[in-house]
């Protein structure tokens, strides 16, 4: 195939762009297909993924979307002898509220008509609750176990803060290797004729076909294409602007740290734990005085949002753990390929995580030198739903705005976008994940009135 004359040009070689190309090439037999990206495949945001997945969302549409994506990931796990290292210990959401009514309402709303079958309530001794002793995704239960009571939670999770009163164990959830998923797809689609070229997109014009100007190996060239898929992640709005279209997307930089937990502060068999409660960080008097004197840090003295993440990394016999916290979710930024990270983030997220798992406090001021501090962008719409399907410009399709759920949603996003490109039947919920949803006043009013963003 000549790479300067193709049927379909996919812009963006992150996990979502690769997944879209994969389903176009493998499922729909499109061989004249080229992926272009300024960097290498699975770099930038995809290289910074938390690599988690879940099927819970406070709206049935997004629950259907993530369930479909999990179905597709499981299919790949079966066919590849679990090359993608899929596990399923679940997500464990905790709060110190004894009866978190709003959270429970969101839980039941997310599972819709299936809620009565999938949600199990446990009080007292715990009854039929089974903790995630195995990481095997094929033997794990579905649905959600809700644990009420401090004593009950301490029975199963003694390393948690004793004030935790309610826990939601989302069972169809876990982690995968996003890099292995991307590599598997790349290798498989190459057998079908799809190709990758490292090139920076400079401009897009259209007459009878698209003419995409790129810079590759220091030289300009023009790629002719019938169809463009915009899967450019945090740069999707920039690509869209090249053909005169605006996308309702903002970018938020999110950061994480990982380090070897040599003190065994975190149980290796613990699900991916998320402390939902907001908090005010504990600082010494001297620290408070220093922070108060620096306007850029004064916010760290104020009450802060919850959703601090912690999970073991590397399997039952590994040592590493990952911590994350999207406390700057309202701070938008222009994307760059090498974002500047906040040097104080490791200390901040560790202090927050220590509230749920007090043993982590032993690392305060003593984080291992070989820790990893990394970050990537959450490209997102206001309602935090993706944009998948036809753009306003004829011949352009979108697979973007998967903020914080790019790895878990990539398979479904790729499948849905590929179906839109070739005109194949798609699930009913596909329209609600496309630009067409903004024409549905009833849906948009519902999303505006309810907390359906699913941010964790």
Image: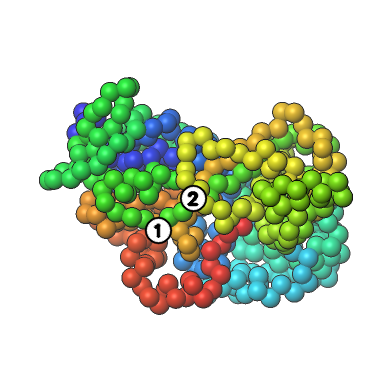
| Element assignment for label 2 | strand
What residue is shown with label 2?
Answer: 251
Horizontal and vertical percent for residue 454? Answer: 56, 62
Quadrant that contains the N terminus? top left
* Residue 325 screen position, x and y as percent: 66, 50
- Would you call the spot at circle 1 few (<14 residues within 10 Å), some (14-19), or many (20 or more)? few
In front of the other: 277 or 15: 277
Q: On the image, which quarter does residue 207 sit in?
A: top left
Q: Considering only vertical position in the picture, is 331 above or below 187?
A: below
In the picture shown, does residue 17 fall above or below 129?
above
* Badge count: 2
Mark 1 in CB contact with mark 2 (< 8 angstroms): no
Residue at 86% x, 64% y: name it.
151
- Identify the residue at image location x=33%, y=70%: 439
> Which image quarter holds the C terminus?
bottom right
> How far, Cα to Cα, is label 1 from label 2?
10 Å
Q: Position of residue 382 (x, y in %)?
A: 47, 62
């Amino acid at each position: 195939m000549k790479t300067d004359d193709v049927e379909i040009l996919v812009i963006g070689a992150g996990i979502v762009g690769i997944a879209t190309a994969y389903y176009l090439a493998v499922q729909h037999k499109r061989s004249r297909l080229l992926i272009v990206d300024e960097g290498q495949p699975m770099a930038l945001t995809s290289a910074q993924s938390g690599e988690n997945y879940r099927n819970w969302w406070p709206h049935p549409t997004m629950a259907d979307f993530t369930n479909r994506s999990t179905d597709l990931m499981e299919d790949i796990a079966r066919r590849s002898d679990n090359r993608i290292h899929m596990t399923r210990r679940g997500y464990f959401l905790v709060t110190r509220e004894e009866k978190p009514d709003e959270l429970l309402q969101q839980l039941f709303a997310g599972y819709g008509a299936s809620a009565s079958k999938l949600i199990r309530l446990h009080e007292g001794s715990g009854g039929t609750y089974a903790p995630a002793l195995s990481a095997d995704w094929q033997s794990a239960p579905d649905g959600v176990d809700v644990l009420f009571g401090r004593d009950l939670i301490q029975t199963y999770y003694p390393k948690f803060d004793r004030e935790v009163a309610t826990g939601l164990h989302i069972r169809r959830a876990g982690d995968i290797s996003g890099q292995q998923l991307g590599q598997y797809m790349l290798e498989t689609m190459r057998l079908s004729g799809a190709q990758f070229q490292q090139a920076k997109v400079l401009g897009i014009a259209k007459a009878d076909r698209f003419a995409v100007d790129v810079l590759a190996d220091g030289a300009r060239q023009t790629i002719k294409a019938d169809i463009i898929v915009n899967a450019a992640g945090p740069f999707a709005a920039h690509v869209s602007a090249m053909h005169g279209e605006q996308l309702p997307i903002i970018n938020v930089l999110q950061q994480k740290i990982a380090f070897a937990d040599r003190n065994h502060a975190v149980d290796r068999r613990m699900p991916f734990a998320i402390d939902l409660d907001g908090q005010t960080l504990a600082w010494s008097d001297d620290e408070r005085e220093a922070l108060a004197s620096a306007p850029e840090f004064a916010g760290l003295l104020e009450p802060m949002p919850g959703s601090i993440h912690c999970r073991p990394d590397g399997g039952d016999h590994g040592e590493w753990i990952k911590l994350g916290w999207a406390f700057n979710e309202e701070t938008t930024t222009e994307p760059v390929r090498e974002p500047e990270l906040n040097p104080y983030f490791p200390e901040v997220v560790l202090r927050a995580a220590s509230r749920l798992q007090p043993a982590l406090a032993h690392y305060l001021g003593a984080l291992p030198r070989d820790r990893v501090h990394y970050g990537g962008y959450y490209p997102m719409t206001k309602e935090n739903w993706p944009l998948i399907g036809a753009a306003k410009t004829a011949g352009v399709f979108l697979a973007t705005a998967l903020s914080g759920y790019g790895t878990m949603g990539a398979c479904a996003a790729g499948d849905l976008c590929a179906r839109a490109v070739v005109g194949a039947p798609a699930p009913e919920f596909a329209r609600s994940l496309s630009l067409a949803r903004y024409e549905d006043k009833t849906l948009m009013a519902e999303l505006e009135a309810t907390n359906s963003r699913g941010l964790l």
